[in-house]
Image (cartoon, helix red, strand yellow):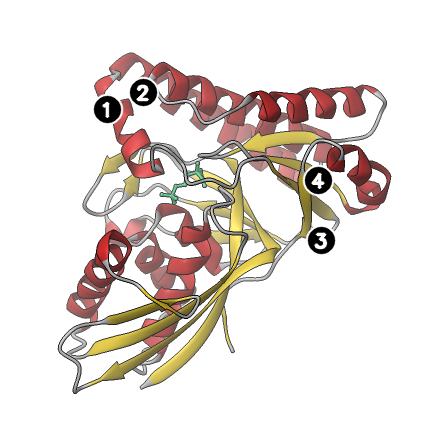
Amino acid sequence: MTHTAIANVNIALIKYWGKKDIEWNLPLTSSISLTLDAFYTKTTVTYDPTLTADILLIDDEIITGGEYLRVTKYMDKLRKLYSIPFYAKITSYNFVPKKAGLASSSSAFAALAYAATKAYGLNLDSKELSSLARLGSGSASRSIYGGLVLWHEGHDHMSSYAEHLTHMDDLAVIVCLIDETPKKVNSTDAMNRLNEYPDLKELWILSTQDALNDMKEAIIENDFDKMGSIAESHASLMHYIIQETGVSYLTDQSFKVMDLTEKIRNEGIPVYYTMDAGANVKILTKKEYVETIKARYEKLSKVIVSYTGMGVSSL
Ligand code: PMV
């Protein structure tokens, strides 16, 4: 009754921002991501009939408080869905720089969904596993798969799942670590503010549907410049929307990295930026350009380079 799983972090090219159902974590729109190979979570779940509550260890530390509650509530949902009668010891290691704004919850809940079902002898297909990971963190639904992934918004638990689109192993992401302090507003709280702004919400939904269709086309055409520019403008739109709801994640340093990206692009190198619920900026490019441009970003921040990663697996 024990199993260990590894899952990678993913980064959204078409962002998920906002929920239409908070309890079931159903997003306002579909989204598209790239799974990264440099950042991952390794999780072991062991069911133990003698336990009277779950035990959670992250990076060798016993976890209590809010983080524990989030995980044990998630395990309660999973136990109810699959009639699992035992509590578990959950041991997790994050190979993601702490608080890097890299959605470590995407790798964490993908690894947990996989390990927790396998440990009980269940063999869910990827689609069901993706829906299950989504209940922990929306972006986790996409970390079940490698490469480029589409998360269908759906309308209920089983219809909101992700699927693999294609691998594309010539892509690279240069992550510029600008701010490693905890975020002021977590993504769920920030997202839910959108419900108080119906016009903005409508703008976001319609623009995201258009961007998603354009991105699907760009992926099919294997047109990197089109993919990059759609991702860049969609991330900028998300940050405009976030700002309008009274939250600000980007700093002066984030804008410097964006400016540098535009400068490098004007020199003829395909580079595009994207940002999530934090100040860090991720540069989308192709493998072949990494060595030429990396040092220029290193003048502005610490950087970590990542390539296309694989989906969740057993260890
Ligand atoms: O999965 P969550 O609840 O951590 O939300 C992720 C939100 C963004 O990272 C900003 C966008 C995305 O699609 O990953």
Q: Estimate how packed mark 3 is, as few (under 14), some (14 to 19) or many (20 or more) residues with alpha carbons within 10 Å.
A: few
How far is disc 2 from disc 1 in space, using C-alphas?
7 Å
Tell me the amino acid under the disc marked 2.
Lys
Instruction: Please tell me whether mark 1 sits on a helix, a strand or a loop.
Output: helix
Instruction: Please tell me whether mark 2 sits on a helix, a strand or a loop.
Output: helix
Q: Earlier in the sequence, mark 2 or mark 1?
A: 1
Query: Label 3, on which residue?
Result: 169
Q: Is residue 224 left or right of residue 8?
A: right
Query: Label 4, on which residue?
Result: 222
Q: Estimate how packed mark 4 is, as few (under 14), some (14 to 19) or many (20 or more) residues with alpha carbons within 10 Å.
A: few
266 and 125: which is toward the camera:
266
Instruction: For the residues labelled 4 and 3, say whether their Cβ atoms are less than 8 Å apart.
Output: no
Q: Estimate how packed mark 2 is, as few (under 14), some (14 to 19) or many (20 or more) residues with alpha carbons within 10 Å.
A: some
Q: Is residue 228 left or right of residue 264?
A: left
Q: Is residue 277 left or right of residue 236?
A: left
Tell me the amino acid under the disc marked 3.
Asp
Q: Nearer the viewer, mark 4 or mark 1?
A: 1
Q: Earlier in the sequence, mark 3 or mark 2?
A: 3
Instruction: Please tell me whether mark 3 sits on a helix, a strand or a loop.
Output: loop
Residue 223 picture quarter: top right
Instruction: Please tell me whether mark 4 sits on a helix, a strand or a loop.
Output: loop
Q: Earlier in the sequence, mark 3 or mark 1?
A: 3
Tell me the amino acid under the disc marked 4.
Asn
Q: Nearer the viewer, mark 3 or mark 1?
A: 1
Tell me the amino acid under the disc marked 1.
Asn
